[in-house]
Amino acid sequence: MYQIMTPDEAVRLIRDEDCICVNSFVGIENPTELHEAIYRRFTETGSPHDLTVVSSAGFGVWDENANAEGYIRDGAVKCLICGHFGAMLSTKKLVLEDRFEAYNLPLGCISHAIHAQAGGIPGALSKVGLDIFADPRRGGCGINSISTSQEYVRVVEVDGEEFLYYKLPKLTVALIKGTAADHRGNISFDDMYTSGDALSICQAVKANGGKVIVQVDRLVTTPARPRNTIIPGCLVDVIVPTEAEKRPVAYRALTGGFEIPYEEWNGWNEMIEELSFSKTKANPVFNIIGRRAAKELKEDDIVNIGIGIPETVAKYARKNGILDRITLTVESGGVGGFPVSGTVFGAMIGATSVYDMGNQFDLYDNGGLDICFVGAFEVDRYGNVNAHRGPGNYSGIGGFANITAKTPTIVFCMTFNTKGLEAVRKKNVVTILQNGAIPKFVNEIRSISFSAKRAIENGQRVLYVTERCVFELTDQGLKLTEVYPGIDAKTEILDLLPFDVIYEEK
């Protein structure tokens, strides 16, 4: 039977050396009150310490002094295993200082490994990650010099085929945020943007004899409808009622509490953008890329659009009149709406369905998407892409590896170079006003997020769309297939590349 506790009472159940699994998605749906109670307890008593923390998509709130940042910075954590570190502003810097062990696994592979543990299976098999950094033969998933464990990812062979085997530590504490708990302890997620891995986490922790702690916005007397219950009360040990997070009115569009017709998507998105730090759509260079990339969309496509430059694709899909004839998806489990960005990335306007995150990665891993639009930091002579590790910065792979592993058409949306790049498009003519100081096409990339070799073997179509040209991946390397009007192929493309590409001048 569950107990009702305050945050400070609840976290006393966490022991030294526990493995905490946090249900969240980048910057949303974090059980913030529980994290801050852990920090208070650690500051006062030095316990719990030597914690391992697992999260599919990370658990920051874009504030280096909030949520879990304090107790991580002060030394309560010995190991982090996350798919993404982007919203963890302090933590992602400390990772590179060797302050604790840190491992970056593909988001969907962590999600599936949690589900496997819930079912009594030690780990999950996947082809996602083969031939990229997560493959132990390509460097492994350890981020810093002290993260040398080989237990989380192994290469195995089954029926003559190679797979990666993803295995997590035994999960002993679940930290979850839900909307409401009824008198039976059933947890609903009605006002949440996503349910993430909540059910699988709770099942795994209970099977391991651990503690499930759920922070909720309210207690209700009316029993939850069975289909609305995400976590049944029998899996819950502690319910922590807290004051509901104050959200701007515009964010009501993201919970699915009311229908939002297609005609209203843009208006709601503009309201949300005003609250966000995302400024990608205002950049004329990014607009050139998004306009060209959007031409690859076809009616009835099932699509994933990444954050950053790829977001401009949706803008031009609307202008092209195809946005309401494709199905957009987001890694957190949303289908059929319009993904938003910035601090609430992972939520959708007008979603027709939001299911468990593991189910979304079933779709992605098995080629269920028709096309995806993703970003890139660097591309090498072979077409390999680094999309997760910048100079002195580490955000992590997130769902990128899962999304690109088997999708038939992959469109990388990227600038030709960066830091100072200026370009304009007028009357269909592109003019490069100033080249950037840092090239994006390089002889050798820092880390491999996407394997060109595997894409060729899979028969995937891969495009690299820039503000001046388009490259396509072939079995002989990159081919320059399109030069925009106004661009000189020799002086503004070929002469700036550190390697040769295939080019048939027309």
Image: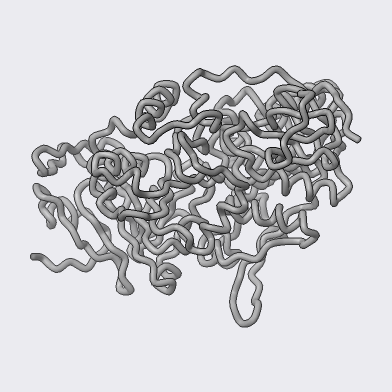
Residue 206 x/y as whole percent: 84, 47
Report the side of 224 relative to 355 (left or right).
right
| 257 lies above or below 367 | above
- Say which of 188 and 486 sits in front: 188
Quarter of the figure with residue 77? top right
**How many numbered badges does the structure rendering display?**
0
- Say which of 70 and 371 sits in front: 371
Residue 113 x/y as whole percent: 69, 56
Please name the residue shown 47% across and 64% down the image: 406
Which residue extends farthest right?
A: 1
Report the side of 416 relative to 52 (left or right).
left
| 251 lies above or below 395 | above
Quarter of the figure with residue 415? top left
The quarter of the picture where the C terminus appears is bottom left
Residue 108 x/y as whole percent: 59, 53
- Say which of 41 and 56 sits in front: 56
| 8 lies above or below 383 | above
Report the side of 168 relative to 436 (left or right).
right
Please name the residue shown 79% across and 44% down the image: 19
Please name the residue shown 71% across and 52% down the image: 114
The quarter of the picture where the N terminus appears is top right
Residue 495 x/y as whole percent: 17, 56
- Say which of 401 and 267 sits in front: 267
